[in-house]
Image: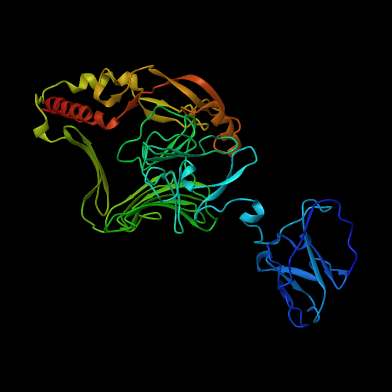
Amino acid sequence: MAYIGKSIESGTFKVLDTSGNTYNGSNVTFSLGTQVGAAAQLLVSHDGVIQKPGTDYTLASGGASITFSTAPASGASIFIVEISGAVGGTITPADNSVGVTQLNLSDGSSGQFIKTDGSGTLSFASVASLAGIDDQSSSNDDQLTITDTAVVINEDSDDVDFRVETNGNANALFVNGGGDRVGIGADPDQGLLHVKTADTSATAGTDSDELVLENSAAGGLTILGSTTANGKIAFGDSDDSDAGAVIYEHDGNNLRFHASGTEVARFNSAGGDDNFFVHCTANPSGGTKGFAVLGQIIVSGSSSTSEQDVMRIEKPSGRVGSIVANNSSTSFNTSSDYRLKENVDYTFDATTRLKQLKPARFNWIVDDTNTLQDGFLAHEVSSIVPEAITGTKDATGTKTKVVVNSTGVVMAEGVEQSDWTQGKTDGKYPSNSTWEASKTVGIYQQIDQAKLVPLLVKTVQELEARIATLEG
């Protein structure tokens, strides 16, 4: 709709030559003979009526033409003035309407950009003048290369680092150009990917340094999953992508170990008990091969009924003991082969030594029922049958950073006080337990009463000989 606009405040005015335009009642777009940035830069009179920019007319052809909303009739009087400078407000150029003419610049070359000299003067410059950004015209400025298919940093493989800072860490991400390493948290100094919180002065092995996690305090790696999913660390090779694995099963609360694609061991917590299984997933029995620790130790061999080792005890000299089972019984053995012995003597006096032994009745201090038992005091046997006794009378040792239960027994050692405090909260340690920096504890003697059997047998033989003499 035609209107009377606000008065012009200031500026430069130029009457445009539109004499070449023909108004015939059908044409709506006409040449301006110049290029302007916005419709508001024109003062347009149509038969003496000022036209409203954007409503009665708009710009076309990048500001080189004017388009009327209604075609001017034949013989219409059109008068157009271009206004430059302030006209009572800010003028926003139309999209894609500003060119070098509007900026009062001489046109540059293809691919150049506009730069300022800091004093208000604009000019065109080549991309090569921006240090470090590659214009693909040479090979010595490739710190940052941007193409249609890739963004590459340091394409020339120079000794140039790449670093990303956060609000609190200057090395949140650090690519070490000279060391061929990537770091998180610090400039990486070992491995391929180095996640570093604080330096430890330690060095990762060259056969296990693809990923290095380092912290001078407690450090670790966490795998999070849902309550019904598994967390897994897998090991593979060209023959088997899943040859080995460590798997934690959240809904079963068990930690499994796999080798050659098969489960070989697991820890689990069932009914509040901590269990350990090898070659089985439950209590082995009935010929099912396996080993289990469930507060008790369960060992099951193969389905064979013949005699076989359940446990062998080896030392540098060879086998020194074993536990052997057949289909009906178990034997606890120690080595006794004649080929292992020398200085064999059958004539020693057993009776005299046997009479020095002091069998006694006693109860254990920890037994609240005070039930009497038969046995020996270890130190009273040590001088008579020393091979039957292990340890030294009244021996003690010192344990450090210990957790002690309410009866004074050491439950754990090497525990930091802060970990003990947290452990009471987590239920790991009893609430009535105590922590001591160091504690002197007894190293108690032990006895193998089977070692007394040869002395007993020899004494019986000596008694039998004396009885036969008296009877003769």
Q: Is residue 61 above or below residue 340?
A: below
Q: Quadrant of the C terminus?
A: top left
Task: Report the front residue among 244 and 26.
Answer: 26
For residue 157, which quarter of the picture? Answer: top left
Residue 265 visible from this viewpoint:
yes
For residue 460, which quarter of the picture? Answer: top left
In this picture, residue 312 sits left or right of residue 215: left
For residue 405, which quarter of the picture? Answer: top right
Residue 430 visible from this viewpoint:
no
**Residue drawn 39% across the image and 22% down it:** 443
The colour scheme used here is rainbow
Q: Quadrant of the N terminus?
A: bottom right
Q: Is residue 177 above or below residue 114?
A: above
Task: Report the front residue among 215 and 67.
Answer: 67
In this picture, residue 375 sits left or right of residue 366: left
The image shows residue 209 at horizontal and vertical percentages of 35, 40
Q: Is residue 132 above or below residue 414?
A: below
The image shows residue 435 at horizontal and vertical percentages of 55, 25
Task: Report the front residue among 205 and 183.
Answer: 183
The image shows residue 406 at horizontal and vertical percentages of 56, 28
**Residue drawn 23% across the image and 20% down it:** 353
The image shows residue 130 at horizontal and vertical percentages of 49, 43
